[in-house]
Amino acid sequence: MIALASLRRRWPELVGTVVTLAVAVAVLTVCGLLFFSARPVVPDRYAAAPVVVRPVAPTDAEAFTEPRPWPVERADALVAGLARVDGVHAAIPVHRFYAQLMLDGRPAGAAQDATGWPAAALAGPATAVPASGRAPAAPGEVVVDRGLGLAPGAAVTLLTAAGPEPFTVVGTVDGPGLWVSDELARARAVGVPAIGLLTRDGTGVAAVAAGAAALVGEDGVVLAGDDRGLLEPVADARTRWIGMQVLSALSALGVFVSVFIVASTFAFATRRRHRELALLRLIGAVPRQVRRMIHGEVLVLGLAGGVLGVLAGLAAAAPFGGWLVRTGFEPATFTVTYPPLVPGAALLVGVLVAQAGAWAAARRAARISPLDALREAALDDKPMSRTRWLAGLAALAVAILSGVAATRTSGANLGTYALYVAMALVAAGSLLAPVLVPPAVRLLTAPFARGRGATVLLVRQHTRTAARRTASTAAPVLLSVAFAVVVGGMVQTTTAFYGLNRVTAVGAASVVVPDGTPGLSDAAVAAGGGHSALATTLYDGPEPLAAVGVGSAEHGLFTVASGDLAALSTQPPAKTGEASPTEAPVLAAAVTEAFAERVGWAVGDTHPVSGPDGRPHTLHVVAVLSGGPAPAGILLDRAAVRTMDPSALTPVVYSVRPADSAAVRGLGARWVTAAAYAREAGDEDDRLVWVFTVVLIGVSAGFGLLAVVNTTLMAAASRAGDLRVLRLSGATRRQVLGALAAETAAVVLVAGGVGLAVAVAALAALARGLTVQLGVGVPMVVPWDTLAATVGVCLVLAVAAALPPAARSAPGAPRAD
């Protein structure tokens, strides 16, 4: 009852806290709903197959590489065995190869591969039964999507890895895809990526899956039900992963900022109520009752903010999910679902966040002495308790350890550790603010204190005598500035890193790049007439190894540390002794120094691998490369790669010839200048990164600005008595408001400076880690425009929030009450 009565009296000053909690719960609700919705979707091509068997996937879920396929011979054996499993009506292997339909010299439709016709049954009756015409039977025949408007008998061109090839449309189906004869698909396919099982009527899927798993053993994985979503395209999986990173960052940042702001707000509110709480202690309230009252108030605020946040989150989930799809953070198959567990969990987390933020305030309130009720002065005689000192120094130690770890790690962990540094320093700066802000304010105002003006004197003295109140006002500004600068600076610093790390074509006059295709065909490469590398993937067990095929013309682009790069084009010497007819073919390979050090390979070594077709091969290392970056860790002869991988595509061709669009027209390629290519190379990734940056800055700065307004309003309202005393002492209304505005501005500028120091420390750790990773100096980039904008907004909001309450407390005529 006491808690409710106190809340009714203090409700206006707590509106900001409720809004902060509501925003936090809304963010958590949206992120939770999208997390549950961001599950792999079963591809349409397997919709009618209740059970699908596929090879073992790489252990690294973030490799985003197709699993090593089965060789055709091994797949045939598995198909024969799976067809005999009880309940299986048919076992159908998937044979597919790269192909795109070209109309008027441009790719048409969404399909980027051609599949053998028998696999159409796995997609369902709409695909398995032609809507018009017939099924393909000969190598030059194709069945296409009826939505393309092509009729049976039409002559079309399919762009394959070799180049454009003529086909005849013999049928259409009600669904996407290109379907060719099984004979052609089997001859062109790079291994078998999956085997679909059609079951007999009345047969349980679980029984069929169990029987298939017993037959396949460790040679594959059986997927049934929703697990078939793991068959989604690698591009969709990567997009979904990016979306998960966005949601994870938003959730973590929302929770941290919410706890920080609630803790700061309630610490200040408790300090404001010091005498009130002391009176409660004086009339007999025990510490346990005071703590219970504070936590009761927080529970009511948490529930109020939580309910508002859940409602807002439910309303915002679908629009935000659509925005993620449009911006490229989720695949087109993404849809929002509404499991009831998520809103309840978000509400619970919101209440727990509020309780966690108010824990220190409740503990402090319970230690108030009853004798404090007899004191009239509101001096911060002990602004730093022992606990606060220990907590602040501990946070500073965590920041230092995270900074050291950031300089010794690599990859995505660099950004994570940089954020840890920022979070720890924000916490340390807020805890130590009572000893940092007052001296900094005195230093800032020193140039203006020579005339000993009343305004400057009031600013300097108040920040010294009310250190905790000043620190509470500075904390949300520190948070807003620190995270806005850290997030923006991380993007610009890592952009500088990737700019240094990007492979460039020195001396190239123009570049041939894909145009609506995933890569360049051999015909496009020949038309480009420059340097290129044929990309493929080898496998060490199930683990992918990036490799490229190069010709003799590219050998001069690399620096050889040991061995002979020319040996790539020759067959390595056969092993002594009698050769087995089933012995794996031997391929000459060159490796980069970084790759060789990581896996322990050296010139003369041989290593068994699997090719992109799933067949075994033996690599014979003939050279180790040093110097500049290579397109992959393993280099093979281009002809060897083409033999293993009929669907391999070339990412880009660097040419010394001027751009000639006519030469590659109709080949799914286009010419651009070298300068244009350098600009375009990272445009899409940069766009996603900047969208991500804006979202993170918006969330962190948005929370911070809410807290700035809320805390400033409370601070101004708490000074009503002080301002009336100033008016009674002879100060004019303009002088009173000017002093308050100057004090607020000084605190904001000092807090902005501390926030900048926090950001610089985090960015320095990031830049140092990138420098160690790359081996060349990576500059730390501070986004000064973001800093200026954030400090400016904080300054305007803080002054605007402080003056109205002060104006009401300092009316035109002095009052003695």
Image (cartoon, rainbow, N blue to C red):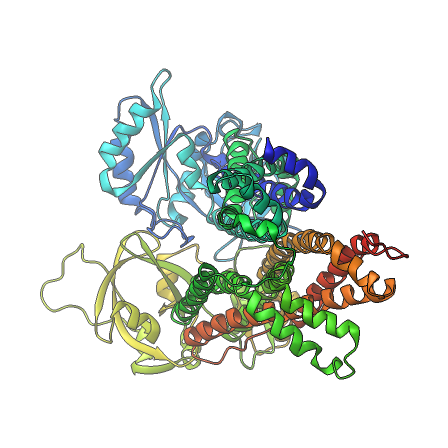
- x, y percentage for residue 77? 25, 38
The part of the image, by quadrant, that contains residue 182 is: top left
The part of the image, by quadrant, that contains residue 586 is: bottom left
Q: Is residue 546 left or right of residue 807?
A: left
**Nearer-the-camera pick, 501 or 734:** 734
**Nearer-the-camera pick, 27 or 495:** 27
- x, y percentage for residue 817? 80, 51
Residue extending farthest top: 202
Residue that appears at 72% across and 52% down:
713
Residue that appears at 32% across and 73% down:
590
**Nearer-the-camera pick, 41 or 124:** 41
The part of the image, by quadrant, that contains residue 443 is: bottom right
- x, y percentage for residue 114? 48, 44
Q: Is residue 533 left or right of residue 166?
A: left
Q: Is residue 712 left or right of residue 119?
A: right
Q: Is residue 534 left or right of residue 375?
A: left
Q: Quadrant of the N terminus?
A: top right
